[in-house]
Every structure is written in structure tokens, then in C-alpha cells.
Amino acid sequence: MNDDWRNNAAAVAIVEFALRSVIRAHPSGDDEGQRLRTAMKMLFGIAPSRGKPTEPDLEELLFMARGYAADRGTDYSFGDNYTPRWSDDSEFDARSTTALANAAIQARLQLDPNYKPHNTDEKVRNLVDKFQRSRDGLLRLVVGWGDDGGADVFVQNVIGLRETLELLGIPIADLTAPNRERNTPN
């Protein structure tokens, strides 16, 4: 694979999820977010973002990937690196990425009525841009994994990591979902 995984929002989110699980199993007085940013920088060279933390868009991006795949149907094959590919004919009735982003925002609003994007048009543009940059990685997360693709993949990867680390005697916290807000420490 020629793509750098650090440019794939889905891959980075899985790594952050796993690291957050390790960080929570080893509490300290330091800020969890800062510890995560430091670990990402030291381990992978991913510099911590400056200013206000970016809005976590992974749920919306996975929603878009599921919609993208559903619009194109079940007649696909897997290309390099387990990336699903559809025929050109599947594009005729498929929604645009802008329509998928709008649908993702509406779905999030239904789940979380307190969610209020500052500027909906800008949010749609950001989602479209992120989806275009990470489309193959996102599709690998949701195609072929069953109805709950995405969240399931995070949990399964962390379960595998937990089992390996526990064999070595290294504790790892049990997080239930990749969404940071749903897993705030008590």
C-alpha cells in the first residue's frame, strides 16, 4: 500500500482508540488528551494539532462510507489491500459525497439533538474533503464486516491488542466505542 496510514482518518482513529485504552489503564495526574497527543507524536510523528481540538468526525465519515457502499450495491470485488471496487454502472443512482455528508449530519442530529455545527455548509465541505482523502480506508472498515461495520472494527482490533498485551502482563482499559465523548473517564 502506497498510502501513508497517517493520512487516513479512520486508521488514525483506530490507533488513537487503542492508545487511549492503554493510557486509561495507566492513569496519572496528566491530561489524557495531552498524553495521547504526546504518544502520537513520539510513536508515529503525528504532530499534535494546535488550537481548539477538531470536531471528531469519525461517526459521520463511517456513516458516509456505509451510504457510499449501500448506494453502489453488493456487486463489488476487492482490489489491492482489501479495498472494495464497484463497476462504473453502480455510479448512476449513487448519491454525491455532498448528499452523503448532509445525510450524516442529519443522522448525528437525530442521535444527539445538542449537536450544533457552527456552520453547516463548512461542516459539509470538511466532511466531503475528509471522506475523499480517506475513502479507501473508510470503505475497508465498513464493507464486508456486517451491518455494524466500523465500530465493530475498532472494538475487534482493541480486543486483539488487549489480549496480546495481557499475555505480556500489560493492562489495557476496556473502552466500548471509538467516540471520545462516550468514553470519558469517570
Image: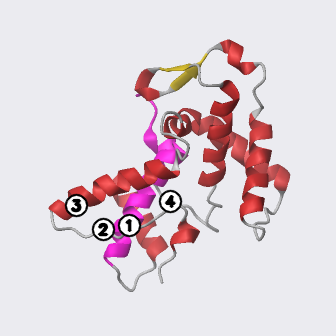
Q: Amino acid at mark 3?
A: Leu
* Part of the protein shown in magenta: 1-26
Mark 3–mark 1 Cα distance, whole angstroms, equals 11 Å
Return the residue at label 2: 172
Q: Position of residue 96 (x, y in %)?
A: 77, 32
For disc 1, the neighbor class at 10 Å (few under 14, some 14 to 19, many from 20) is many
Q: Residue at x 44, y 60 (%)?
A: 17
Q: Are marks 3 and 2 in contact (CB under 8 Å)?
A: yes
The numbered mark, 2 or 1, whose residue comes first in the sequence reads 1
Residue 171 horizontal side relative to residue 69, left or right: left
Q: Are marks 2 and 1 in contact (CB under 8 Å)?
A: yes
Q: Position of residue 150 (x, y in %)?
A: 52, 47
Mark 4–mark 1 Cα distance, whole angstroms, equals 10 Å
Q: Is residue 144 above or below residue 55?
A: above
Disc number placed over residue 178 in the picture, else none: 4
For disc 2, the neighbor class at 10 Å (few under 14, some 14 to 19, many from 20) is many
Return the residue at label 1: 21
Q: Is residue 22 magenta?
A: yes
Return the residue at label 3: 165
Mark 4–mark 3 Cα distance, whole angstroms, equals 19 Å
Which SS class for mark 3?
helix
Seen from the viewer's position, the closer of residues 41 and 22 is: 22
Quadrant assignment for the N terminus: top left
The numbered mark, 4 or 3, whose residue comes first in the sequence reads 3
Which SS class for mark 1?
helix
Which SS class for mark 2?
loop
Q: Is residue 132 above or below residue 124?
A: above
For disc 3, the neighbor class at 10 Å (few under 14, some 14 to 19, many from 20) is some
Q: Amino acid at mark 4?
A: Pro
